[in-house]
Amino acid sequence: MERELFEKILNSLIEGIIVVDSDETIAFINDEALNILGIDGEEAVGAPVRETIPNTRLHIVLKSGEAELNRIQYLKEKTIVTSRFPIVNSNGLVHAAMAVFRDITNVEKMAEEVINHKEMEGLLTSIIDSTHDAISVADEKGKIVLVNKAYTRITGMSPDYVIGKMATVDIAEGSSLHLEVARTRKPIYNARLKVGPNKKEVLVNVTPLFVKGSFKGSVGVIHDISEIERLARELEDTKRLLRYMKAKYTFDDIAGSSKLMQVAIDQARKVSTTKATVLLNGQSGTGKELFAHAIHHSSDRRDASFISVNCAALPETLLESELFGYVEGAFTGARRGGKKGLLQEANGGTVFLDEVAKMSLSVQSKFLKFLQDKEIKPVGGNETVKLDVRVIAATNVSLEKLVAAGDFLPDLYYRLNVVPIVIPSLRERPEDIPEIARLVVMRLNQEYGRMVAGIDPAVLTLFKKHDWPGNVRELENIIGRAMISMELEEKTIMPSHIKGVIERPEKHGELPVGSLAVLMEDYEKEIISEALERNDWNKTKTSNELGISIRSLYYKLEKYGIADNHTDLMI
């Protein structure tokens, strides 16, 4: 009865069990062993183990008396893991051996699938991480389950921080598109959002994921708009070097109510209604191209092309081919079929030649012929093309001096100098600075997404005293840098925001005197020192001159370490 119960227990196990006696014959084999080995039980019991079971090692365990644990064994199409044990009698002698084994064929296949899955997952992760655009994947509930490396670069958020959280975690401005797609099951394209702590502006496409018709989540592809805009600018820079097909500015865009500026604007307005050639004279950064746009926009050619060419940006041979075009085979690398020149594309409109003084003598000669004959001959061609083009030229150097030096053709100078307009420098019209600065702040508010309300009067005072060698362009640069340095809650550009940005105006005689409230903090020590020198170190006179109390003056002397080498004369 006990043997029968014992056999039932062994037959209920999921492991196969075989026992051999000292004669190497099978004494017991359970049902799972028969199933795994595919043999008949009646034939197996009492049969020699080596003849019945392929690759068995039970006879070796009988002889060695040493157990063999967790050995892999292959039986035709099956793989088993087996452990073999010697069975010792009461005398310590090995009189039998037992094998316990399990079929792991399915487990092995599953392990291979897991390994293959992990390899595929690793491959897909590598592919996703290699893309330049950010990718985020959300499940059907809108929780982030996967992001790539570019996601962290664009949003500033790490995978550990966002994975497992709702897809709203990275949204700074706007709503979560993952949640919207989870609600509608429809894709969303070209949505503008701001993401991350720096509120980076991005363009997002999110598409739903369906597996066998069941919604499983969504994939978002995030494009960095600043990168797109940078690439667009680079592309634009390669297109014929600042070539504009339409004028962008009008006279309303030109700031300045000073007498000098109004004279220039009035001249430009009057000449805009004619076909006369215009020569704009002015330092770099004064707005010559702005005037050129405005003149074209106010003319009867406003609906035609406006082509801008920077003569200093192109070498001689390239400038010639760009202006006049070329025929096929004109030179090595010439485009098949040739190419129209900018003058021909400006036909009926206006061409603006910036830095015309940089034009070589050979190109000057050919351009002079165009002004005289109103026709051009493409490089390498024999036929002429009649054109109707209005010419506006600009220079920041004296063409008269270049003519005298033999570096500019006199006839071309006279052809260009039909209506000369002098655009005043910023230092010549300091009264225009507040108006210009206000417009610059408004424009940069839009560019930078800021809300700067204005400029402190002390800053405007400094601006008016500055020499402005870079003119309006320099003013824009300084205001832009000041706005970038401001905290988001700050609304007014203060002296501290332009600290070290502009040079102190050259002194002409004594430093300005008056209330310290209108003087830059940076200059306070020097102002006090010079005031003391003027008053022979009489602190009472000095404090009266500066408009501060004697106690405040002593505090500032100690603060700035201004040594007192004189004896006070208290009056």
Image (cartoon, grey):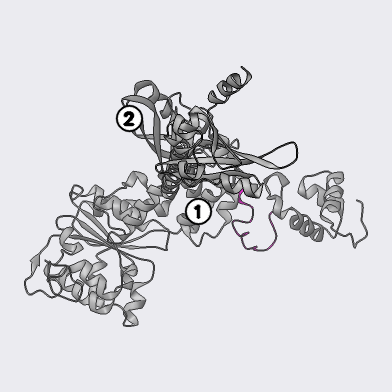
Is residue 545 found inside the magenta-colored segment of the image? no
Q: Position of residue 545 (x, y in %)?
A: 78, 50
User: Between disc 2 and disc 1, whose residue precedes?
Assistant: 2
Residue 187 image label:
2
10 Å crowding of disc 2: few (<14), some (14-19), many (20+): some
Which picture quadrant has residue 364?
A: bottom left
User: Residue placed farthest to the left in the image?
Assistant: 383
Name the kind of residue labelled 1 in the image: Asn
| Boundaries of the magenta span | 497-513
How far apart in space, not on screen, are marks 2 and 1 (Cα)? 42 Å
Crowd around label 1: few <14 · some 14–19 · many ≥20 (10 Å) = some
Residue at the spot 32% in from the left edge and 51% down from the top edge: 266
Q: Secondary structure at mark 2?
A: loop
Amino acid of disc 2: Pro
Identify the main secondary structure in magenta.
loop
User: Farthest residue in the top direction?
Assistant: 1
SS of the residue at dot 1? helix
The answer to whether 222 is drawn above or below residue 214 in the figure is below
Q: Residue furthest bottom?
A: 406
Which residue is label 1 attached to?
477
